[in-house]
Amino acid sequence: MRYRTLGHSGAVVSTYALGTMTFGNEADETTSHAILDDYVAAGGNLIDTADVYTAGTSEEIVGRWLAAHPTERDQMVLATKGRFPMGDGPNDHGTSRRHLRVALDASLRRLGVEHIDLYQMHAWDAITPLEETLRFLDDAVRAGKIGYYGFSNFLGWQLTKAVHVARALGFAPPVTLQPQYSLLVREIESEIVPASLDAGIGLLPWSPLGGGWLTGKYQRDTDPTGATRLGENPNRGMEAWEPRNKQERTWRIIDAVGEIAANHGADHAQVSLAWLEARPAVTSVILGARTQAQLADNLGAAAIALTPDETELLDTVSAPVLGDYPYGAGGTAQRHRSIVGGR
């Protein structure tokens, strides 16, 4: 296992994090605790959960594991999120001071801790003034309830605005962003990755295997059967099956991943994860597993070092389709002219 700092902070985390969205749903408590045991034994130290995962049960399961492992707790970097509804009232969601105060205290209770290392806003809130949200987070840092804060599912301009508002008001700055990112989903490289690099924000990619597509289990024009990575229901998580199946890019990526996997004596998932772990701005890739076997397989990616030629091949076949302007060829030409002094 390799380690990096958590964004521009001084906290050190493993380059593979353990996501716990399956805890209490696809993975019962016994299995969830076994997954945690295996993750820690492999050298992992970043546990990521959220208040809405299984309606709070995921946090409770993590909390009971932490209580039973006080020594390991001291080494873990614990992350959770708030933002989405945890009730039916008008103030039971969002990033207002009113909701976040209640949500943070509830997460602390479920986790059985007095301090959360990384508290993340699960999505942008278009209603609450950003200054209100950032002031609450700064207060929580000063009160010792959280060590750092970050965001999830923010756009590039939203992230940059948050960074500069925090700086202007003298608040503690954000350190991380959780975006969807994989060989199949690279659109964040247009704005979000450059914004993160500019601000020293560490990326914590979710869905690194593209909802199971990058495991190599799917075949062209053949509907999947049996269990998916999310459980025994073969339809769960398959909303994108038809459009993704029709894209030639999908199968170019899967074929290239398979070719490289064969060269390494590895599997598709391990190669896909190794590519992502090495991307600019990535701090830690979030692994989601419902079984110990899935986790063990994914952690095997830590032993894979792709060659420059292999990385170039994956970069080429997975290049996102961005259109001509502003991020495609037309935008590139405009930027080149501005660099050389033209208009």
Image (spheres, rainbow, N blue to C red):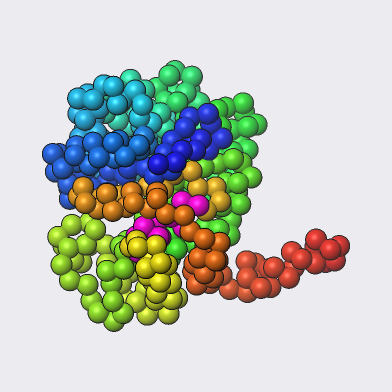
Question: Where on the picture, by quarter, is residue 316?
Answer: bottom right
The residue depicted at 50 percent of the width and 52 percent of the height is 278
Residue projecting furthest to the top: 143
* Residue 272 magenta: yes
Report the span colored magenta. 268-278
Q: Position of residue 3 (x, y in %)?
A: 46, 38
* Residue 261 magenta: no
Question: Where on the picture, by quarter, is residue 140?
Answer: top left
Q: Nearer the viewer, residue 91 or 187?
A: 187
Quarter containing the N terminus: top left
- In the rendered view, does 9 fall on the left or right side of 123? right
Q: Nearer the viewer, residue 299 or 130?
A: 299
Quarter containing the C terminus: bottom right
The residue depicted at 30 percent of the width and 30 percent of the height is 107
Q: Position of residue 306 (x, y in %)?
A: 48, 59
314 versus 157 height, above or below: below
- In the rendered view, does 307 fall on the left or right side of 113? right
Specify whether residue 229 is in view.
yes
- In the rendered view, does 174 fall on the left or right side of 181? right
The residue depicted at 18 percent of the width and 57 percent of the height is 231
Secondary structure mostly seen in magenta is: helix
Specify whether residue 87 is in view.
no
Q: Position of residue 286 (x, y in %)?
A: 37, 47
Residue projecting furthest to the right: 341
